[in-house]
Amino acid sequence: GAGVSQSPSNKVTEKGKDVELRCDPISGHTALYWYRQSLGQGLEFLIYFQGNSAPDKSGLPSDRFSAERTGGSVSTLTIQRTQQEDSAVYLCASSFGLETEAFFGQGTRLTVV
Amino acid sequence: GDSVTQMEGPVTLSEEAFLTINCTYTATGYPSLFWYVQYPGEGLQLLLKATKADDKGSNKGFEATYRKETTSFHLEKGSVQVSDSAVYFCALSDRNQGGKLIFGQGTELSVKP
């Protein structure tokens, strides 16, 4: 597609449920990044992929968070047993490589009630 | 670890006023520096970047110079417009850390006609 696509754009879930957030990067982009934007914490790095491997998962807040990428393309961020503090906008970005411009998707707004 | 600090907002200016948003960073390596902008209802977009000391990034009338001696990357514009109203994020990226972006907390700019 023309840009980074994220789905759903909005998700409301009950506390304790699992959620999956999807990111379709720009075709050909090998690097893919997940960030979280919340009122109290600003923009935080979560994880990045180079191809299908994740060399840096240091930003994942807890073991309830996991992510995978398949075929060097689509990535899924999974949050298990959601908590209210997980409410945030989850942003995905992709780039051709480590030193090239990262393009961001519109984000998924997650609300845990 | 690496970090970015930028001046807090919100900043309110009249149209045609001069804009400065301060940004300083802490990094162990030799990072690239960025300004991203988030217009209301839109995703994050790269505004400008600089990859080494003394480089000047510029775009849409905005400028920022990579100052290694003061570890700063202040954003400036000589004459702001109402359409510049947005949230501005300073960020750094270190190639040795996979190109992930470390963001400042963001500065909201509101330009009044």
Image (tube, coloured by chain):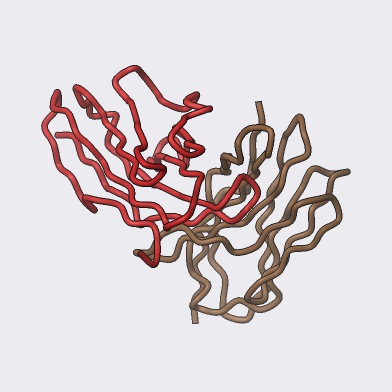
Chain colours: A red, B brown
Which part of the image, by quadrant, shows the N terminus of chain A?
Answer: bottom left
Tell me: residue A46, above or below residue A90: above
Residues B78 and A72: in front is A72
- Would you say A72 lies left or right of B84 here? left
Residue depicted at x 48% and y 64%: B86
Residues A27 and A20: in front is A27
Measured from the top left, where is residue B108 in percent x and y? Answer: 50, 58
Measured from the top left, where is residue A86 in percent x and y? Answer: 29, 31
Residue B43: quadrant of the picture? bottom left
Residue B4: quadrant of the picture? top right
Q: Residue furthest top?
A: A63
- Would you say B71 lies left or right of B49 here? right
Tell me: residue A48, above or below residue B58: above
Measured from the top left, where is residue A8 in percent x and y? Answer: 21, 50
Residue depicted at x 74% and y 61%: B64
Residue depicted at x 65% and y 53%: B34
Tell me: residue A72, above or below residue A58: below
Which part of the image, by quadrant, shows the C terminus of chain A?
Answer: top left
Residue depicted at x 66% and y 67%: B19
- The count of marks equals 0
Measured from the top left, where is residue A84 in percent x and y? Answer: 23, 29
